[in-house]
Amino acid sequence: MIGVASAAALLLSIGLLWARRIDTATQLCALQALSAAVSLGQVAPTVAILAFALNGVALPLAIARLHGATMLQARGAALLSWTVALALMALTGMAFAGVGTDGLVAAGASVALLGLLLIAFRAHPLAPVLGFLSSQNGLVMLAGAQSELALPTALAVALPLVPALVLAESWQRQ
Amino acid sequence: MSSAIPMMVVALPVVSAAVLAAIASWRIATWINAGSASIQFAMACLLVWHSSTAATQLVVLNAFVAMTTSWFGYRDIAASLAARTLTRRRARRYHIGCQVLIGAVQAAVLADNLTLTWFAVGVAVAAAAAITGAARGAAAATAMSRLVLQCAIGLVLALLGTLLVEPAPVPAGVFLLLGYATLAGLVPLRSWLVNAAAEGVAPGAIIVMLLANVPLLLFMRLHIAPELLIAFGLASLLICAIARLDRRRTVVLAGLAQLGMVIFAIGVGARQVAWLHMMLLTLARSAVLQSHGDDVIAWLVLALLPLYALYLLAVPTVAVAGWLLVPLGAGVLLATWALIERRPAGVPADWVARTPVWLHLALVALLAFAMPAPVAAE
């Protein structure tokens, strides 16, 4: 189950990099939050529910209320973005190949880093929020790989401090 | 944070921020800000008296800089209000941001858990954004956006590193270094700190730069590969020393170049030198910024600090690899020259403006010649 959920989250990250419309990207992010919550669910169900409520429902709704332009403009050549994304996944896969079970660490780290790539390769004002939200989902998955989930760690992954900060800045700029 | 004093050091600024949120008058807010910072400094002294460690000494340093900035920043706030670069509402945001930032930085220093430190740094970043964005104008808004974006990247990488410490310690070190170096304003994402210091409200720049000391303390505590630290330190030193910008940005960049030296010193195992240089740099940089870059003596002290650090670092560097002295020496000369080239003509005539500068410089001299024993022992 964890393996399927983490693979789904990784595929959704790739989908996010392809997405051309902001509403599609937001929905993909919400689905990814669900996958990430499923991978965390077996370790800490309450934290997983809280993480999904905030990362998969509250923040996507806030993004939906904010966005003006609908198209996610690409920044730079598509070939370059894909090369960088594939290289990043390959490197992460190699670095974390033997770490943890079900490939959760490798998938979580890949999702977190691909989220940062989204910020670099999309020119929309809300692209950073989506990118950080996707990264947060990767961090939720990584929390699922911890042997024991301490309260500070649970809060750090369940509360989307960074995406919320970037969203607040975008809101203020608007 | 086991005893009550550290808790009070952290809680006092948070309570002050809550009080400041309800105060409309900027004059009263300035007094509350200064009073709170002074009480916090007294408590920080009590804390270091109680237990003198690297963390508690950094708490005292932060509290001292915050206190002098809040006392002598009054005139800058008044001037900004008169020049309409600050409104009363924005001044309130600035004061609240200052208190929250100081509290968060102190919490990050005193926290004994990596995730708690991360949380505190996250709050400090939000407060730094509020302080930078308090100034009116497009330049300040852009500086705030850049701060939020780059620090957010740093926070994500730092949390990624924190979560990887247990399952994969080696890659964790890389992410922690990249993340926290970004939060210290070092390469590759250094522009946020330079812009925040240049475009924000004048005294705010000094407070925002206190944030940079937290990652350095972490680098001393964490087990990061020394080769990485040396490479990162040298890259920061050389890149920041080469840049040529206006006077205020030059001060910030020279400070960042010297932060690179601190990381280099940690990498070569000279933690004592790293610690001393970090403290001297914080005080000297604050002195220059307190004088708005108009005091030639403060300026020269900041310019000569890298040479003093080079003298202290020579032996530990040679012990690691002699050739490292070449890039280190080149970086030091470039950083020193960048400052000397842009030095101001004299000292401010106004004694009130000179007071905090001389206070800071006196402490620089005291620390440089008589390093506190616990620091030397660590």
Image: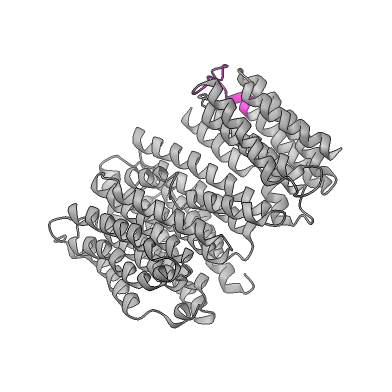
A40 or B310: nearer the eye?
Answer: B310
Taking B101 as reference, is A65 left or right?
right
Number of callouts in the render? 0
Q: Is residue B16 visible?
A: no
The correct choice, above or below, for B125 with respect to A93 in the image is below
The one nearer the camera, B145 or B72, is B145
Where is B183 relative to A59, above or below?
Answer: below
User: In the rendering, at what x and y percent does residue B102 appear?
Assistant: 47, 59
Q: Residue at x 56, y 26 (%)?
A: A81
What's the magenta bit mostly, secondary-structure-wise?
A: loop
Q: Is residue B105 magenta?
A: no
Residue in front for this viewpoint, A155 or B238: B238
Which residue lies at the image location 45% right of the left edge and 67% below the top edge? B320
- Tell whether position A69 is magenta: yes
Residue B131 visible in the current orientation: yes
Q: Which residues are magenta?
A: A63-75
